[in-house]
Every structure is written in structure tokens, then in C-alpha cells.
């Protein structure tokens, strides 16, 4: 169960729910972190697969963005291992004018050895309130706040990278409290991946504890597709790699 929780945490940090998936997660998110349309008016659809070997267990992570209607999309993240699975879904609206991701419904489900967990949030951008449907509680947020859930901010980070930003801050909610996630670009690096060598920009989450280091690598020429996520904590490192990617139904066969 600890392995599955570590995967969930890693993707939650960058996900890019990065994400990664998923972040970070892979953030990506999963994250998720594929590409957006050149004009920025629409988001390109994607489906990515990430793999890892953690504490002897194989883990597979999938992240996909699908269209709902108009400017509404659904971002999905799922991590599977023999110990259980974690599924996150964020329904979002893309505000092309502000270039902003606006979540309106989020669910989290964990089925694992020993303990399951469910969460569900609903965002009302008219009344600036968030309803925690799991415990029937509601709370307000500042009308100027650009609130994200644990998955939707992965998409926002990708947009910010495309816009050329080098540092980012997001206000994340889990339906009980708000928390700041801060990231910065720390340099360029060429990675070897199952899809070939690729030039990436390396991003670090900056507001973590001293014994936790989180990095994510995004493919610059593929509009910041997340290709690798790593979390180092208490002397152990967990790394998740991109193994398969498709954008608008077209597979990326080689970088």
C-alpha cells in the first residue's frame, strides 16, 4: 500500500495529477501534459502511458484529456499496480481569453490493500464556492483566486510553460483547505526515453520539505509533453517514465 500511496503523492504534486501523472505528477498530471492547439483557443486531446518499477512492483499510469462539449474537457489519471489503483478525474473549462484552466468537478478514488478513499468536489465560479460532496460541506474562495484541484493544475502548468514562464504558483484545494504549490524552471537537459532522446526543460517543485526533492522533465519541441517525473524522499527515489503518447489520436512513435 505504501508504494501505491507514494505513486499517488508523486503525481499529485505535479499532476503533472502532473503531474504527473501524473504533477508531479505524472504532472502529468497527470499529470497528462500533452500539447495544446497553436492558437490557444482549444486544447489538443491526448492519451499518455507511463511506467515505473517501485520497490519491486510494476506500476502503469495512464493520463488522457478528452473533449466534453464547447470549451469543456475531462482530464483523467489512473495508476495501477498489484497493490491497488488510484483514479482521478477533473472536468475543466478552458478560458481562452484568460488562458486559464477552470475546474468545475473533481473526483478521487483509491482502492488499495487495507484502505479505500473517495473524494468529490464541485466548483461554482459564479458564487465562488466549493462544495465538498464527500462530507457535505461548502466553503468560499476569493473571486480573484485562480483555484485548481489536484489534477487540473497540471494543464495550467503546461500552458504557463508554453507561455514562456519560468516560475509558477498555484492554489490547490482538496475540499478541506488550500495549499500553495510553487515550481521553477532549473535548466535544460537531454533525456533518453523509450521513444528516443529528447531535449527537455527541467522543473523543480520548490516548496517541499528539506528531505523531499521533486523534478519533472518536459519535452520542449512537443509543447511540453511530460516525459519523466522523479521524487526523492528519505533516501529513496521514485521515477516514472513516458512509454507511450498520442496527440489528437496520432501516436508519437519517436522523438
Image: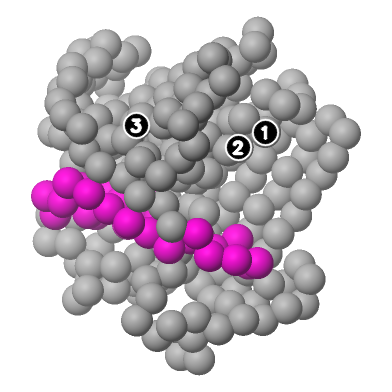
Horizontal side, residue 85 vs residue 192: left or right: right
Mark 2: which secondary structure? helix
Q: Position of residue 96 (x, y in %)?
A: 23, 71
| Residue 146 among magenta residues | no
Q: Earlier in the sequence, mark 3 or mark 2?
A: 2
The stretch in magenta equals 153-179
Q: Earlier in the sequence, mark 3 or mark 1?
A: 1
Horizontal side, residue 221 vs residue 63: left or right: left
Residue 206 in view here: yes
Cβ atoms at labels 2 and 1 below 8 Å apart: yes
Q: Position of residue 199 (x, y in %)?
A: 16, 23
Instruction: Please name the residue shown 29% across and 29% down the image.
Output: 217
- Answer above or below: position of 229 versus 77: above
> Cα distance, mark 2 to mark 1?
5 Å
| Residue 167 among magenta residues | yes
Q: How is the image coloured?
A: one colour
The disc placed on residue 5 is: 1
The disc placed on residue 216 is: 3
> Cα distance, mark 3 to mark 2?
15 Å
The crowding category of the residue bearing disc 3, from other C-alpha atoms within 10 Å (few below 14, some 14 to 19, many at least 20), is many
Q: Position of residue 143 (x, y in %)?
A: 40, 85
Horizontal side, residue 166 vs residue 93: left or right: left
The disc placed on residue 85 is: none
> Cα distance, mark 3 to mark 1?
19 Å
The disc placed on residue 8 is: 2
Q: Quadrant of residue 152?
A: bottom left
Mark 1: which secondary structure? helix
Amino acid at each position: 500500500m505504501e508504494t501505491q500511496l507514494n505513486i499517488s503523492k508523486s503525481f499529485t504534486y505535479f499532476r503533472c495529477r502532473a503531474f504527473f501523472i501524473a504533477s508531479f505528477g505524472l504532472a502529468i498530471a497527470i499529470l497528462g501534459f500533452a500539447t495544446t492547439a497553436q492558437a490557444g483557443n482549444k486544447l489538443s486531446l491526448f492519451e499518455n502511458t507511463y511506467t515505473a518499477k517501485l520497490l519491486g512492483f510494476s506500476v502503469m499510469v495512464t493520463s488522457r484529456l478528452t473533449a466534453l462539449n464547447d470549451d469543456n474537457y475531462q482530464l483523467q489519471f489512473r495508476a495501477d499496480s498489484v497493490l491497488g489503483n488510484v483514479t482521478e478525474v477533473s472536468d475543466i473549462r478552458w478560458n481562452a481569453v484568460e488562458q486559464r484552466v477552470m475546474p468545475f468537478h473533481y473526483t478521487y478514488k483509491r482502492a488499495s490493500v487495507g484502505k479505500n478513499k473517495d473524494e468529490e468536489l464541485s466548483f461554482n465560479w459564479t458564487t465562488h464556492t466549493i462544495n465538498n460532496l464527500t462530507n457535505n460541506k461548502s466553503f468560499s474562495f476569493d473571486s480573484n483566486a485562480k483555484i485548481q484541484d489536484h489534477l487540473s493544475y497540471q494543464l495550467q502548468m503546461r500552458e504557463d510553460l508554453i507561455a514562456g514562464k519560468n516560475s509558477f504558483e498555484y492554489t490547490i484545494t482538496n475540499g478541506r483547505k488550500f495549499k500553495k504549490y510553487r515550481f521553477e524552471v532549473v535548466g535544460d537537459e537531454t533525456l533518453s526515453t523509450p521513444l528516443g532522446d529528447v531535449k527537455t526543460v527541467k522543473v523543480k517543485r520548490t516548496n517541499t520539505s528539506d528531505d523531499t526533492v521533486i523534478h519533472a522533465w518536459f519535452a520542449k519541441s512537443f509543447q511540453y509533453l511530460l516525459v519523466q517525473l522523479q521524487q526523492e524522499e528519505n533516501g529513496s527515489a521514485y521515477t516514472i517514465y513516458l512509454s507511450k503518447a498520442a496527440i489528437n489520436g496520432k501516436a508519437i512513435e519517436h522523438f
